[in-house]
Image (spheres, rainbow, N blue to C red):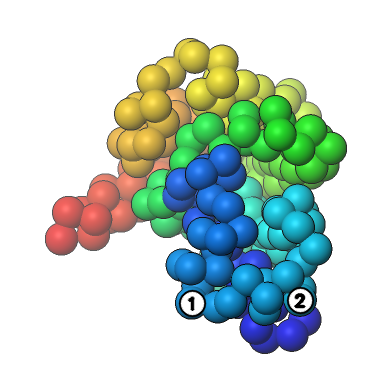
Amino acid sequence: MEERKQYIIKNAGQLYLKFGIKNITMDSVATELGISKKTLYQYFKDKEDLISQVIDFYLDDGLQIEIKNPASKNAIDNMFCYRERIADLLKFYHNHIEEELRKTYPVLHAKLHETKRQRIFDNTIENIKQGISQGLYRADLEPSFIAKLSLGRMLYTMNPEYGIFEDFELNSLAFFDGILDYHMSAICTEEGLKYYKKQLNKVQNETKN
């Protein structure tokens, strides 16, 4: 992909994440990125085309939903890599962006929703199997069952559209840590829980400093 086009897609995506799709027009994108509308329309025929390519870009880039990192040494470390991605996302995430996408561009929303659904499910199964093999997660766990619970939590319980939690809660890293603690306390062995608590204390202290 041409470097300028990638720059536009990446930064337009951040504008949508921060301010919402409805509030960001093609004029807004051009102004914020310091480019002319003519340049913008050289790469994208309209706003829907831009949003479609933004979604494709972020899906290819993992969309913050990959529970794995080649540099991590075990399944619990992978969960903390995931936590780090969530922390970065919370800095500029507009909670109702997916609801706006569903109402305005339903085909694009369906594509995004299905991709997220499959990735969360597959990643969770992979993480559970890895943790079991490393003795960090309980051997009696059924990976597909845990993956379905995680899927429901991510797509429904933590979705502001359903009104289960308030926006200020969903925007809080402390809230995500509470969800993570609930999850890890249920699946870890004694050894795994000790390691998880140690790592949690470490990253939380780093955040304070």
Q: Position of residue 98 (x, y in %)?
A: 62, 35
Along the line of sight, which residue is nearer the eye, 1 or 183?
Answer: 1
Determine which residue is flagged by label 2.
42
Determine the CA span between mark 1 and mark 2. Answer: 15 Å
Name the one closer to the observer, 197 or 206: 206
Quadrant assignment for the C terminus: bottom left
State which quadrant residue 173 falls in.
Answer: top left
Q: Residues within 10 Å of mark 1 (few under 14, many from 20)?
A: few
Residue 207 seen by the camera? yes
Residue matched to label 1: 34
Judge from the rendering whether residue 57 lies leftward or rightward of residue 8; answer left or right. Answer: right
Residue beneath the point at 54% across and 50% down? 24
Instruction: Out of 192 and 100, give the one closest to the viewer.
Output: 100
Give the mark, 1 or 2, whose residue is nearer the N terminus: 1
Residue 186 shows in the view: no
- The residue at the point 76 percent across, 66 percent down is 44
User: Residue, x 41% and y 51% (percent of image)?
Assistant: 92
Above or below: residue 83 compared with residue 36:
above
User: Residue 95 in the image: x percent, y percent?
Assistant: 48, 35
Identity of the residue drawn at 49% across and 14% down: 163
- Marking on residue 135: none
What is the secondary structure assignment of the residue under circle 1? loop
Q: Position of residue 49 (x, y in %)?
A: 78, 57
Provide the secondary structure element on which disc 2 rests: helix
How dense is the environment of label 2, judged by Cα within 10 Å: few (below 14), some, or many (20 and up)? few
Could you tell me the amino acid type at mark 2? Gln
Picture mark count? 2
Indicate whether 195 appears above or below 144: below
Spot the residue most to the left.
209
